[in-house]
Structure formats: structure tokens, C-alpha cells
Image: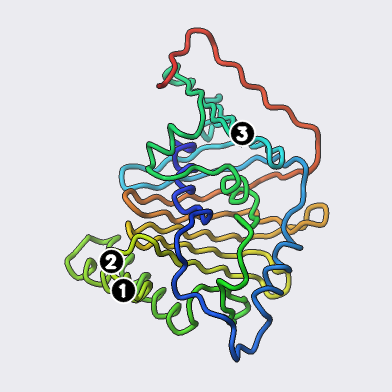
Amino acid sequence: MFLIVTLWFSVFSCKSKKEIIGATSVKDVDTKSPAYLLDKMYQNETRFDTFSAKFSADIQTAANNVSFKTTLRIKKDSAIWMSISPVLGIEVARVLITKDSVFFMNRINGTYFAGDYSYFSNLLNTEVDYQLLEAVLIGNPIEKFSPEDFIVFHEKNQIVLSTHKKRLVKKTLQKQERAEKMERKEKTEKAEKIEAKEKNIITKATLNDTSAYVQNIWLNEETFKIEEYRYRDVNPDKLLHIFYSNFTNIDGNNIPHEIKLVISGGQAAKLTITYSKITLNTEITFPYTVPEKYEQIK
């Protein structure tokens, strides 16, 4: 369950060659330039060789609500390892993700998967990307953004890097929040009309345009850490909204101890990760051995 939700993040990978619409150069903006802010963001990303942590997680979908505990180990740009257990209980699943392979075993039903990302790419009808998974779990930027794609404005105590003008972003987000609130109660005709209008506001393009997406990055104006990230793929409509909070300084790095994700598009899900212990740059291992009696998932 956790693996599938985690891989859903990839549907919003910004490595796509899609056109970013609404982007414009900075003119008469009373703030720092996008190039300066992106540079500060990268300077202040968490730097590590290994990352070890324990966290509790909660996944909410329309069908159910699942909570579990996880031991997480990451070797930068190399591997992600997870041991998953119920809140109180023994290990039920183990995951090993490398830059080109995915391994997963389910101890409950005695099955395992071993292969490349194509299985999940086909399942999700999108590219699966290791870099995105690692960045989301750490709270780092998901890629190297281009300054010319963004404009800048302030919002409360945050700096916002956006592919849209300030007025358009605020109007869009307000309409999105209203639509999502209505859809949580029931998917009414009125909610669908608001959703359709929002697409027009976001893209200023036809709904048949499959080459457009918009994104916003909220930075803390003192630490330049990402506190919020929002990515919207226009057609088909897909949304990823990430919130990072409860930052703690660990070995000179400001690391979020709570990560909340809202995912929609096809299926909707909410994932909350709360770290209880994080250590950097210690020696770690990635034990992964599949029992002979397990049946392979193909």
C-alpha cells in the first residue's frame, strides 16, 4: 500500500517536457529574483550521505484509512530501504528501491516483486522517478528548476515562486479550495462546474491541451527551505500538494519532521508522515532476502 502511494508521486514529476504556461519574466517585482531564490533554496537543501529514520504514517483514501510504522534508510542517489509494520506488530512488508530497480515483498500473502520501473510506469501510466521519491522523503527540491519559468511574490512570511502571476495564483487556489471542500461532501454538479472553471483559469488554454502544467513553491523567507509545494497537471487533471513542517536542525541541516501530501487525479489520497527519529551519515545496511516459498508478482 505504501509503495503504491509513494510511487503515485511520480505522476507529477517535473522532468516532463511539457510546456509550463503562465510563466513570465520578473518585471517590477519588489523582491529577490527567481535565480537568487532558487540558488538559496539549493544552498540550503539537506546535504547527507546516508539518512536513517523512523516514522509513523497515515494513508487516507476513499476506501480506507491505514496507519503503520516504518524504518527508513536512504543512501543518497543510490537506494531507499523501508521496513513496514503495523502500529503494534511485526514486519509485514519490506521495500528496496534503487535508481533503476524496485523490489518489494509482502509477508502477509507471501508475494514479491522484482523488476525495473516499467511495471509501475505502466500501472500508473506515467514515468516513475527515483529522484522524486528521495527528494519528497527528505524535503529537498525535486529537480533543478529554471529561473526563467518563475515569477516571485510574498505571501505572509513566505516567498512564493510561481509559474503564474500573483493575482491569478490566489484566485486559482481559492477556487480549488472551495471545489475540494464541496467534493469532500459530495460530487455535485456545482462542484464539477467550479472544477471546469478552475482549469480555464489555471491554463488560459483549451481543455484539450495536454502539454500544460503549473507549479508553486513556498519558501521560508529566513531559511529558504521549502514549506509547501504544489504541482497541477492540467489534462488529465492531476494534483500533488506537499506541506513540510516542524523543522529541526540536525547536523546543520533544517529537516522537516512532518510531511503531508494531498494527491488527486484518478484516485485521491492523503499521506501524513511524522518522523520520530532522524540520524545522518551513519553506517547503514539494506537487508533484503526473499524466502524461496514466496510467489513472484509479474
Which quadrant would the C terminus be assigned to in this image?
Answer: top left
Q: Marks 2 and 1: CB-CB under 8 Å?
A: yes
Give residue 207's mark: 2
Q: Based on the displayed image, in which of its 4 quarters is residue 236 positioned?
A: bottom left
Q: Is residue 169 above or below residue 285?
A: below
Q: Position of residue 7 (x, y in %)?
A: 48, 42
Q: Secondary structure at mark 2?
A: loop
**Residue under circle 1?**
200
Q: Position of residue 217 (x, y in %)?
A: 57, 68
The Cα atoms of the two marked residues, 3 and 2, are separated by: 37 Å
Give residue 98's mark: 3
Q: Which residue occupies the foreground of this view, 131 or 96?
A: 131
Residue type at numbered disc 2 = Leu
Which residue lies at the image location 55% right of the left edge and 31% below the top edge? 84
* Viewer-side label of 3, 2: 2
Give residue 119's mark: none
Residue extending farthest bottom: 28
Q: Is residue 154 above or below residue 91?
A: below
Which residue lies at the image location 44% right of the left edge and 49% below the top edge? 11
Q: Position of residue 73 (x, y in %)?
A: 67, 36
Residue type at numbered disc 3 = Thr
Q: Is 11 left, or right, of 253 in this rendering? A: left
| Lower sequence index among marks 3 and 1 | 3
| Lower sequence index among marks 3 and 2 | 3
Q: Is 247 left, or right, of 153 in this rendering? A: right
Which quadrant would the N terminus be assigned to in this image?
Answer: top left
* Viewer-side label of 2, 1: 2
Q: Residues within 10 Å of mark 1 (few under 14, many from 20)?
A: some
Q: Based on the displayed image, in which of its 4 quarters is residue 139 positioned?
A: bottom right
